[in-house]
Image (cartoon, rainbow, N blue to C red):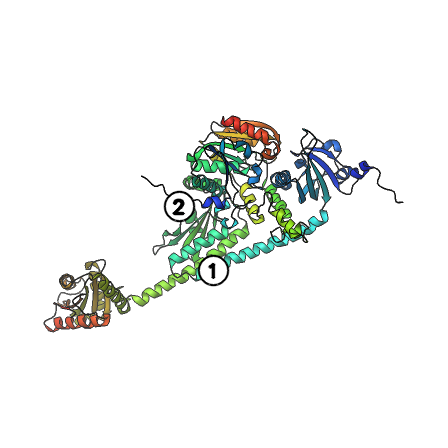
Amino acid sequence: MTIAPPLDTSALSRNNVKISGNPAGRPIIFAHGFGCSQEMWRLVAPAFESDYKVVLFDHVGAGGSDLTAYDRSKYDSLHGYADDVLEILEALDLSDAVYVGHSVSAMVGVLASTHDPSRFGSLVLVGPSPRYVDDVDYTGGFSQDDIDALLDALDANYLGWSSDLAPLIMGNSGQPELGEELTASFCTIDPAIARHFARVTFSSDNRDDLKDVVTPTLILQCNDDIIAPRVVGEFVHSQIPGSSFVMLAATGHCPNLSSPDEVVKEIQDYLR
Amino acid sequence: MTQLETSFEDLYEHSPCGHMSLTTDGMIVRVNSTFLDWTGYAAADLVGRPFAELLTRGSQIFAETRYLPVLLLEGAVKEVALTLVCADGSDLPTLVNSVVVEQAGEEPGLIRTAVFDATDRQNYERDLLTSRRQAEASEEHVRVLQRASSAFVSSSSEEELAEAIVESMRHGFAAASVAVLLTDESGKLALAAGERPGSEEGPELEALSSRQTVVLSDRRAVRDRYPTLADELKSARLEAVTATPLSFEGAASGVVLCYYGRARSFDGDAIDLQEAVARQASEALARVRLQRRLERMALFDQLTGLANRQLLKVRLEEALATGQRTHHSTALIFLDLDGFKTVNDELGHVAGDEVLREVATRLRSTIRPSDVAGRFGGDEFVVICEDADVDAASAVAERLRDVVGAPISGIPDEFTVSASIGVAVHSPGISQSVTPDRLFDLADTAMYTSKNSGKNRTTAVIVA
């Protein structure tokens, strides 16, 4: 008789991992992008529960993750986030997993699966961009000044927004419980971490990594997506060997909220 | 009676805030006159366009990644700061409240948005923000330096200091990996702490010779200069490198290499801070190295480089304690040179020193690696042998007597030098416990027995 070593499950509480659906089904893991939390998938994930083992999680710094696990050196590149994904898959001992990554988490999935492809069965990249800033012979859609402007916009919105100041900012100083509810509801993110995450996200360049993807990949591209324009989605498609590309009818950057049914259908069709 | 508002149309169009309705994916379906007045657009310019297109680039990213997702999940958001771009290209800072309203039947929902001109607030906030960022940056600067300096001060060896440098750089600059390379006696760099991915030496040598921080801020910059290193970094999931030299009073003492997992832009302040930490590290390194030299001077004989009396005592105490614990014998071999006084008197001190140095060299090359040779004083030498009984120690003593008695080049043949040797052995089980001083006395006495019975011989005793 062989005894398997105990699995390291610390990633599960660190990343606030939630498991639902069919325990015997193929695993499908949903990764949220910058600015939100696993709530981002709440109109999409339930559609997979009858057939799949559904795994949701928060990146460190978002939602119900363990903020004390935030190590600036580790999370100074998307590799730190990719390592977390690998640790979650390992802690749950999942194989043949479908990884669905939105926005920056599309690239997190690319990095995780190229570093260790063994647990991945499929990648679904929703609005991916390997580099947001324009470069010679490459259109990412943004300039370096735009990224600095985003950091200004973040600061303008989070000026003094910490948990103890939130009730004042929300104008509910007489009703602190209301303020608490507002920060503790959807898509809570830690402002300082959000700032660093924004810098890491929008200064990353992972174009070189796309050609190393060996996992079957579906790219879902929206119309009029300012964050990840169509040319960028097509670039990703051209670089990932054997990838499939689907143009959604949805517009904007968040089809998982604005057109969840279409997103569900395209993923299901691809996996069928 | 005051006249009541009668036209809701007019109330909507000329309300004191901008109004706008959007589809849930952000397309403008209706705007009021106030909004058009503020922004200078015509309604026809806006209807059917994505709202995000009216925003500055920074606000666009914020709107798409934060404002819209939270709005759609929560059903409402309040006081979101977004900056609009007006028809004439000017910026209009606004605060936005939005709600999602369900439509009857199968119709998709709509987003109703109220827009408030926040120019004054924005100006005030910008000042606040600028000063807050400056305060945070200088606070961070001080914090990094303080952390580093307290870690460096408490380091008492090169190894400890190198580890402290790794930690300070990792934390201070969010480096994914840090390597500290220190120069050895011949001036070559060797890894002292941390990890050094890749084998191509480049940035470190450049930093060492130029005495300047070398910054390779992205993969392309690395590849242009060091193509092999670029490949090695890629497989280690790293992209950028900085190499900061360590030097003290003009002499290079090492290089700190910081590796980053993504392209990083380093402004002058960031490099200044790295160099300030490196200066502190250099000073600490000089202090640790000086300390080590002083310690060596205090423990080793200046002429021969052998252990001096203080160190011999410590080593003997350790050897006796080990022997007691492991039930092994410990031997102390005491040598006194025969004929040395004549050399010194007739050929001079320089020749005498030469003899002492040569004897030291011969002792060192004859004993086992685990033995300790020392100069007890004058022409007296000592060898401590762990795990040696009286037979083994006597055999070592005889070998020593042979090598010391061999001719010394530069010293005329008529000046013969030999050794009178005393061996004292402590055997747990047979011997009473003994102090180092007592064992020195016993070996010294045995040596005198050899001296008095004709010199150039060995006398061994076992401690009773």
Residue positioned 69% across, 29% down in the render: B105
Q: Which mark is residue B360?
A: none
The percent coordinates of residue B213 (x first, y second) are 47, 51
Element type where label 2 sits in the image: loop
Q: Which mark is residue B201?
A: 2
> From the viewer's perspective, is B373 left or right of B141?
left
User: In front here: B453 or B59?
Assistant: B59
Q: Amino acid at mark 1?
A: Ser
The percent coordinates of residue B256 (x first, y second) are 43, 52
Q: Identify the subunit bearing mark 2.
A: B
**Quadrant assignment, res B237:** top left
Q: Which mark is residue B149?
A: 1
> From the viewer's perspective, is B409 left or right of A58?
left
User: In front here: B49 or A22?
Assistant: A22
Instruction: Give the tally of numbered discs.
Output: 2
Label 1 neighbour load within 10 Å: few <14, some 14-19, many 20+? some
Q: Amino acid at mark 2?
A: Glu
